[in-house]
């Protein structure tokens, strides 16, 4: 049981948890700025970036794909800003236009190009491949202290851990400006804070988390984690610091509970096959939000 | 140099008092679209006085303050604080935005909001000391909100929220206070509390500039007026500049639903 768990379940569980927390953290600020849709937009627009990177390099390699995804995310942010300013329309509409267009473009690119031989398709984009992120070099808990075995860990694990660290460092160091400019942008600007840059920084952090998580866990988890844990956390407290901590807790709970339910839930119910871990994690986060909306102590009357 | 040219271009004498004025605007033009909201406005704020910025809706009153503070970027013109650019004067300026400009459901407490006024002192990571909290509490005390320090800001009334904003500005320990509609939608008790605080600031030698919309209280509250309707219409002591002619010019036909109706 131990060896099997460490090899087959521990890596996807950790990667799912890290991805969920990395997305939930910037999601708090997106939520309070009424920009939650940006997470949705980013996770859609990375698709054409990844396809273009694949077409250019001809291989499913992590680095070019992340660069492609980041490029597409940047392009999307610029397009959203341009449409919002030139068209003088509200940001939600600009995002809706940009992310559906870019996502559709990505789907077309996928169809028209010869990607059939590799594991790159729309389903992969939606669900990721969490269950396949296994650690074949592990023979048990002792492998966690064995450098040779650790070298065989799925590269998504250190990548996601670094991403979470980066997002966490950004949030902690810039906590005061983030809070100030999110609450009262005019006052923040009068203090001399670069509010446009801070807003862009939040979007870049969200994009970083989305791009890193996208490959491992797919866009469903990314979209759900940007919104559900922060929204549920907001209903649990009236303090921003506590809200962020609650959101990280909810993200962790969603990942662990969702992964477990996906793997074993159907078996308990008498079915033979397990269900998509990504789908279940997202569903659990939605259920948590529902419970918080019903019973959370700080619902707005 | 540019400011001398601009002032001269408007046919006005180049005044020495730009270097003394807590705030001097020269040729400030702001546009959000094709139409300018504020058109080539000059303004010279007199130190140690309370000035009301008055004008009809959409006259560019708030925009003028925002342009001065760099919150919106003017198309042309410049703002000087004590003769220096905004950048070197920020520590001496406090700002109270319109209450309706923020989301009061934001997860934060009254004391937290007041502490935001200490940002330039605390910076990114400097530790909050007991003296910082004591100072914030004193500011809350001055606006009569000390008992509400731990309240979530969404649980306050409009007047209480306005007082918290004023306390935050007090926490900035500034010499120039710029307030955007501080009396909008507040109860009578709050209005009195706010005006008391502003007058005590003035009596301490500070300068107060407030966007104001209630013409009936101008004479009781303010020393000076600045009338604006996209362009500068009049500026000076209340007794000289707050005339029916100037008001007629500023408000045009719209005056009848405002001041005249109220004083009749």
Image: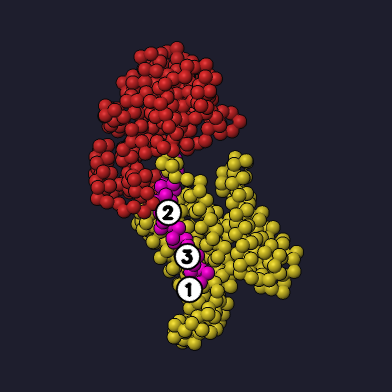
Chain colours: A yellow, B red
Compared with B49, A162 (above or below) is below
| SS assignment at label 3 | helix
User: What's the CA distance linking mark 2 and mark 1?
Assistant: 27 Å
**What chain letter is assigned to the residue under label 3?**
A
Residue ID for mark 1: A14
Question: Would you call the spot at circle 3 few (<14 residues within 10 Å), some (14-19), or many (20 or more)?
Answer: many
Can residue B235 be seen by looking at this rendering?
Answer: yes
Is B218 rendered above or below residue B147? above
Disc 3 target residue: A164
Q: Which residues are magenta?
A: A158-186
Name the residue nearer the viewer: B250 or A201. Answer: A201
Image coords of residue B123 (percent x, y): 37, 49
Q: Secondary structure at mark 2?
A: loop
Q: Mark 1 or 3, which is nearer the eye? A: 3
Residue that label 2 marks: A174
Q: Is residue A181 magenta?
A: yes
């Amino acid at each position: 049981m131990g060896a099997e768990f460490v090899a087959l379940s521990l890596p996807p569980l950790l990667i799912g948890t890290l991805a969920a927390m990395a997305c939930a953290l910037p999601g708090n600020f997106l939520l309070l700025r009424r920009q939650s849709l940006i997470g949705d937009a980013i996770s859609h627009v990375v698709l054409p970036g990844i396809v273009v990177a694949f077409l250019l390099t001809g291989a499913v390699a992590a680095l070019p794909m992340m660069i492609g995804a980041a490029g597409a995310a940047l392009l999307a942010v610029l397009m959203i800003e341009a449409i919002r300013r030139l068209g003088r329309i509200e940001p939600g509409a600009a995002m809706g236009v940009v992310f559906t267009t870019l996502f559709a473009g990505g789907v077309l690119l996928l169809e028209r190009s010869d990607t059939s031989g590799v594991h790159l398709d729309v389903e992969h984009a939606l669900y990721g491949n969490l269950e396949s992120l296994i650690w074949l070099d592990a023979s048990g808990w002792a492998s966690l202290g064995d450098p040779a075995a650790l070298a065989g860990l799925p590269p998504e694990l250190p990548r996601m851990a670094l991403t979470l660290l980066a997002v966490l460092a950004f949030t902690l160091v810039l906590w005061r400006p983030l809070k100030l400019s999110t609450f009262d942008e005019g006052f923040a600007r009068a203090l001399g804070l670069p509010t446009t840059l801070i807003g862009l920084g939040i979007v870049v952090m969200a994009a970083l988390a989305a791009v890193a998580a996208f490959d491992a866990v797919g866009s469903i988890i990314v979209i759900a984690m940007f919104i559900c844990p922060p929204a549920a956390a907001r209903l649990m407290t009236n303090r921003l610091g506590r809200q962020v901590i609650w959101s990280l807790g909810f993200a962790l709970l969603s990942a662990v509970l969702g992964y477990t339910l996906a793997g074993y839930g159907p078996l308990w119910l008498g079915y033979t096959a397990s269900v998509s871990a990504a789908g279940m994690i997202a569903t659990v986060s939605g259920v948590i939000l529902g419970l918080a909306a019903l019973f959370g102590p700080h619902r707005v009357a | 140099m540019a400011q001398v040219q601009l002032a001269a271009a408007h046919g006005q004498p180049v005044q020495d008092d730009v270097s003394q004025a807590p705030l001097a605007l020269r040729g400030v033009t702001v546009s959000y679209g094709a139409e300018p909201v504020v058109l080539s406005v000059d303004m010279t704020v007199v130190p140690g006085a309370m000035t009301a910025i008055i004008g009809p809706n959409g006259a560019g009153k708030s925009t003028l303050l925002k342009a001065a503070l760099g919150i919106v970027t003017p198309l042309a013109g410049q703002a000087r604080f004590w003769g220096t650019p905004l950048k070197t004067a920020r520590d001496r300026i406090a700002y109270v935005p319109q209450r309706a400009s923020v989301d009061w459901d934001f997860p934060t407490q009254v004391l937290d909001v007041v502490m935001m006024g200490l940002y330039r002192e605390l910076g990114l990571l400097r530790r909050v000391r007991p003296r910082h909290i004591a100072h914030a509490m004193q500011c809350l005390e001055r606006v009569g909100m000390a008992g509400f320090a731990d309240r979530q800001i969404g649980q306050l009334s409009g007047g209480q929220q306005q007082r918290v904003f004023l306390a935050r500005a007090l926490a900035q320990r500034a010499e120039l206070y710029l307030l955007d509609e501080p009396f909008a939608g507040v109860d009578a008790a709050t209005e009195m509390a706010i005006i008391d605080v502003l007058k005590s600031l003035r009596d301490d030698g500070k300068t107060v500039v407030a966007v104001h919309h209630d013409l009936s209280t101008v004479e009781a509250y303010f020393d000076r007026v600045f009338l604006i309707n996209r362009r500068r219409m009049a500026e000076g002591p209340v007794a000289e500049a707050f005339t029916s002619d100037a008001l007629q010019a500023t408000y045009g036909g719209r005056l009848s639903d405002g001041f005249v109706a109220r004083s009749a």
